Every structure is written in C-alpha cells, then in structure tokens.
Image (cartoon, grey):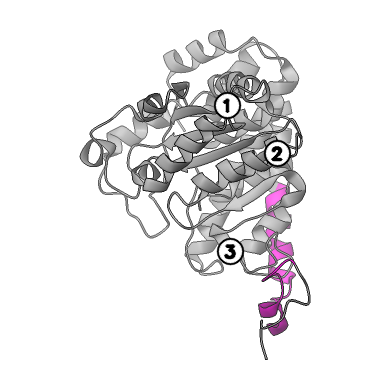
Amino acid sequence: MAASGTDLSKQAKAGTSFPKETYLQWYEQMQLMRKFEDKAGQLYGQQKIKGFCHLYIGQEACVAGQVSALEKGDKYITAYRDHAHPLALGTSPNAVMAELFAKATGCSKGKGGSMHMFDKEVGFMGGHGIVGGQVPMGAGIAFAEKYNKTGKLCICSMGDGAVRQGALHEAFNMAMLWKLPVIFVIENNGYAMGTSVQRTSNVHDLYKIGLSYDMPSEPVNGMRVEDVHEAVARAAERARAGEGPTLLEFKTYRYKGHSMSDPAKYRTKEELEDYRHRDAIEGVRHTILTNNMATEADLEAIDERIKAQVAESVEFAENSPYPTPDELYKDVYVQNDYPYIHD
C-alpha cells in the first residue's frame, strides 16, 4: 500500500510523546485486527462464514486508542461491527474466528455469529444488532458502575447512522442528569449504511449533538491512534471524577463497504485512496521506524507471528464442533432452571 510521505512524516513528528512499548502494542493490536478481518473477508467469499459480516478495516485506531487509554475492568459496548473490539481486549482469535464459523467454541458459543460477539471476562459487553440499541445499554452499564461504586466506566461506540435514533437522545439526557461514567463514541465513517452524513443530517459535525445536553463534546482524528488515546484519556478522567459523560466524534473511514454485500458505489476510488494514505497502521509503523523504536526485521517478526495466529484461528474454527440442539434452551435466562423455556 502506498503511503503519503507528508502525512506520515507529520504523524511521526507529532506522535512521539508515547513510549516505545505503547507504539509496539498499538502496531501489534491493529495488525491483528487488520489481518484477522482480511482473512474473515476471504472466508466469507468462500462461504465458510455465513450470514452478515461487517468489517472494521481502516478504523483500527478507534479501538486500539480506547484500550490503551482505559483500565482493566472498564466496560466496552458497540454495534454489530464488533470483531476488532474483543481482539484488542485480549479475547483469543480462536474464539472470535470460531464464533464467525458459528461453532460451539466461539466466544458466544456459536449463537451470536459476526454481529453478536461477547466476552465478559475482558469487559466486552457485546456487539448489538439493533441500530443505536447499545446507546441506552451503555448508559445503563455506566449506571451500574456508579451505583456499585466500582470506579470503572463504560465506553459506548456507535456508527454515524445511529445518531438519528431517538433512544440516543433519551440516553444522553439521563447520562448527563445522573452524571454517569460513560464515554459515548461516534465512529463517523461518513456513510452510515451507504448514505452520506450530508444527505441525512442537518448537523454535519456530529459531536455538536452532545452540546445541546451541555455534554463535553469534541471531534477527534480517528485515523491517528495517538489522538484517540488522548481524547479517551481526558474523557475517562472526567468520568472517574464524577463529572459525567463525554461525546467523542471519531472522524474515521472504513475501506470496505457497510457489509460484505455492499459494493460501496456511493464513493469514489480517489476518496478511498486518499484515506488509505492516512492509514493508522502505516502511521504507527512509520513512527516506530523513524524514531528507531524497532527495526524492519522486528516488525516483520510481529507480522509473521500474527499471520500464524490467524492461520491457527481458522484451523481451530474449522475443527470445532457446531452447538448441539439442546443449546437452544441454554443461556436464555440467568437462572438455569427457569420454567417455561420449553415443555
């Protein structure tokens, strides 16, 4: 992939306030997300993965910057473009790939598939298929953290299309009224399901929606992981201090269509290529090499390790069993012996 020397040089100069370990963590996390989803796209084309499949390719900095800025025990919730979140949080790629294959060894026991990944152990409270449905749920999770005095917060991600949902406004109002420890994130890739923000919203700078609730709100360059980390860290400090929610609008871009069935004819090849020149992974790679944090050989070794991880996840998924029929009646209620599930 070609990269703009001017863009990357600016990133390298602006982004050296973080230690080497952070940059290497970002590089490895984002490469895992990218290579995993590249493979998922191939497998979908081979019909080994069925149903819906929404890829995150191009938006990796949005997740990597969140994870590095927050603490263990914080909660994450998002919509159905949800493969990258558990991978960054430490869920085994085997479990994520097995879920895509609808296998019993998946992180949702093969019952959720691409759109409904969950991993409570790493604080991932799921991908949710109802557009905007996760927004009041994110506020509710934050309410629980405040009620239980855990000192933790919830970060709730949504796409730009979700801001048209009425539930968002109800959640914003209650979150501000009760000063809930929640960070609302709009991952604005410009097109929602395929229609530009300019054609669907009178407000083009979506972060301004939060201002009507007196919610601290700001735009963030979602193609720079450093900017994401810093914005989330500021919002987290406010939340933990009891000062309530923040709305962040990550200006980002997905390289693929809305889903695997979307040819993305609503945008130009020139626009896509322009954003590829700003690629977050290439930016981090350039910063690492420019500042002698690692060598080309070191990064190639990381790439090879990730390639092996992804290959192992595919083999694991293919060799795993499907859920048995009795799984239909499990995990419906928390109470194992709840009556009336079936006769």
Q: Residue at x 44, y 29 (%)?
A: 249
Residue 112 position (above or below residue 68): below
- What secondary structure do most residues of the magenta stretch adopt? helix
Can see residue 274? Answer: yes
Q: Which residue is mark 3?
A: 113
| Region in magenta | 308-334
On screen, residue 241 versus residue 62, left or right, reads right
Q: Residues within 10 Å of mark 1 (few under 14, many from 20)?
A: many
Tell me which amino acid carries mark 1.
Gly
Mark 2 or mark 3, which is nearer to you?
Answer: 2
Question: Residue 23 appears at what percent x and percent y?
Answer: 67, 22
User: Cα distance, mark 1 to mark 2?
Assistant: 13 Å
Instruction: Identify the element where label 1 is drawn.
Output: loop
Tell me which amino acid carries mark 3.
Gly
Checking the image for residue 147, the label placed there is 2
Question: Residue 158 appears at what percent x and percent y?
Answer: 47, 42
Instruction: Identify the element where label 2 is drawn.
Output: helix
Q: Which residue is mark 1?
A: 244
Which comes before the other along the chain, label 1 or label 3? Answer: 3
User: Cα distance, mark 2 to mark 3?
Assistant: 32 Å
Marks 1 & 3, CB-CB < 8 Å contact? no
On screen, residue 206 versus residue 43, left or right, reads left
Between 146 and 266, the one nearer to me in the picture:
146
Magenta stretch holds residue 212 = no
Q: Residues within 10 Å of mark 2 (few under 14, many from 20)?
A: few
User: Cα distance, mark 1 to mark 3?
Assistant: 34 Å
Between 276 and 62, the one nearer to me in the picture:
62
Magenta stretch holds residue 330 = yes
Q: Residues within 10 Å of mark 3 (few under 14, many from 20)?
A: many
